[in-house]
Amino acid sequence: MTTAKNYQPTIGLEIHIELKTKTKMFCGCLNENEKIGSAEILAANKNVCPICLAHPGTMPVPNVAAIKAVIKAGLALNCELAEKSKFDRKQYFYPDLPKGYQISQYDAPLCQDGYLEINQKKIGITRIHLEEDTAKLTHTKEGTLIDFNRAGVPLMELVTEPEIESGAEAKEFCQELQAILRELEISDANMEKGQMRCEVNISLSATKNLGTKVEIKNLNSFRAVEKSIDYEIKRQTKILEANEKIIQETRGWNESVAETFSQRAKEGSADYRYFPEPDIPPLIFKANNKEIDLKKIKRELPELPADKRKRFSEEYGFNNSDAKIITSDPLLADYTERIVSEIKIWLQDCGEFEGTAEEIWQNNKDKAFKLMAGWLTSKLAGLLTARKLSWAENTISAENMAEFITMILTKKVSSKNANILLEKMLETGGDPSQILEDEDLKTTTDFDLEKVITEIINKNPEQVAQFKAGKVALLKFFLGQVMKESKGQAEPMEAEQILIKKLSDKN
């Protein structure tokens, strides 16, 4: 993307991900920050020990599970793995670091030189390293409160090459990375809960030389990543067009006014005075390493989201949008595949189709897949979001969802009543056929739809004349009358087709 007057943005990302390990990075304290999702619901300073609090004489011991998690991420992101790595001390003085330094990695990261492909473009990954998270500060009028529950939580940092060209591309990179992390089961990577935190480095230049770099910190949503970049491109363009200089600084993002704001001058690596961590020996990855078997980790890698999207599109005919939504959450993807297996049985056993089991499947699977994609990504996903529930909290079994889709396919329930039925299924976790009976939601067959429509048309000659004169919006009026007369049992699409045919009749 090229902005006005040919100013070219150069964008790189630094992304921090809290890892889903049982314990913290360098001690045995529970890592409940990731498991629960928000430190606020834990009692303050519940999971702390002398190591977390940097008491004199304490010794850090690296968490092997966290190291394996970063290696998994590196393999999934096409990185080169280090044969030898080490931890370093990153010096800075702030209350969230009781030691006065952070244990991180500087010149020997666990993974480097990888890439993530977005829309057939490979965006380079400079490095992936491991460090400890900091404590949480709460500023009040009386002073600042410090909660050390988060201090020492394993934190994976991923740094991209400056190859991203727009806010939209940065957003898509973050979304795809989140899907991979979830598939690997190393982090839930929920940005709103702070499990995945993004920082943007951006500069503009009209030449081949890079411009002055500005950092945007602590972006907590995909939307914030995209919008902050778009805003910063416009802001820097105005400065350059006025022949003024960009200041190298760290900026924040104000969501309410959709603008970045200045925070402080940007630090350089020299300011942190890195040096090797003396209390932790170097990490050596040999072929016979019993604790970290690289070949075993590689064999255990799951099917990654891009491959799964392609397979779902080919096997189930999902469009790109539906396939992306379904594969973005491993629980939803697994749920979808279990529904597919159940639908095959329901179509065979429902008694509505003739032929062999394979003939029934081949004749109806495409319609079933289309219905399934729509009801999962739109209707059920919407109900869960409205109730602030995750797919892990979905109470509708794959078998019941398959029966529900079969009911719609065989017109045992109308589209309108199917929405009511689905909501009741989610509320109760119950069987759809039983709810259909209890709530009297079945499609009735004891009325003649064409006859009902004819009677409605005869009762409303004025509206018929207006429709024929070009007021086509009246179709909704007639459709509403049909649904009222049929008590919601008529299939809207079928009713609409009959209405159009009869209302268009010249007689």
Image (tube, rainbow, N blue to C red):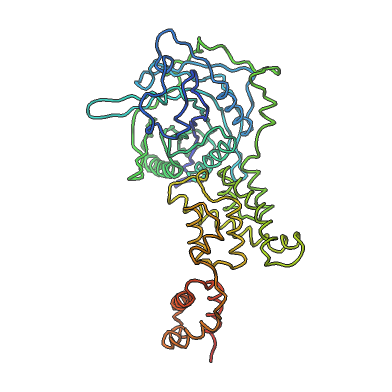
Q: Residue furthest top?
A: 57
Q: Nearer the viewer, residue 308 or 413?
A: 413
- Place of residue 467 in the rendered image (x, y in percent of width and height, measured from the top left): 46, 83
Asked whether residue 159 is in view, the answer is yes
**Residue 261 horizontal side relative to residue 77, left or right:** left
Residue at 53 percent across and 17 percent down: it is 87
Q: Is residue 201 visible?
A: no
For this orientation, the residue located farthest to the left is 142
Residue 203 image position (x, y, % from top left): 45, 36
Q: Is residue 356 above or below residue 104?
A: below
Q: How many marks?
A: 0
Q: Indicate whether 216 appears above or below 449.
A: above
Q: Residue furthest bottom?
A: 507
Residue located at (44% from left, 87% from top): 459
* Horizontal relation, residue 345 to residue 411: left or right: right
> Where residue 375 sits: x, y (%)?
55, 57
Q: Quadrant of residue 50?
A: top left
Identify which residue, 11 or 338, lies in the foreground.
338
**Relative depth, front residue between 149 and 118:** 149
Q: Residue at x 59, y 59 (%)?
A: 405
The answer to whether 1 is drawn above or below residue 145 in the figure is: below
Q: Give how far across and how far down residue 393 sits, in percent.
A: 50, 44
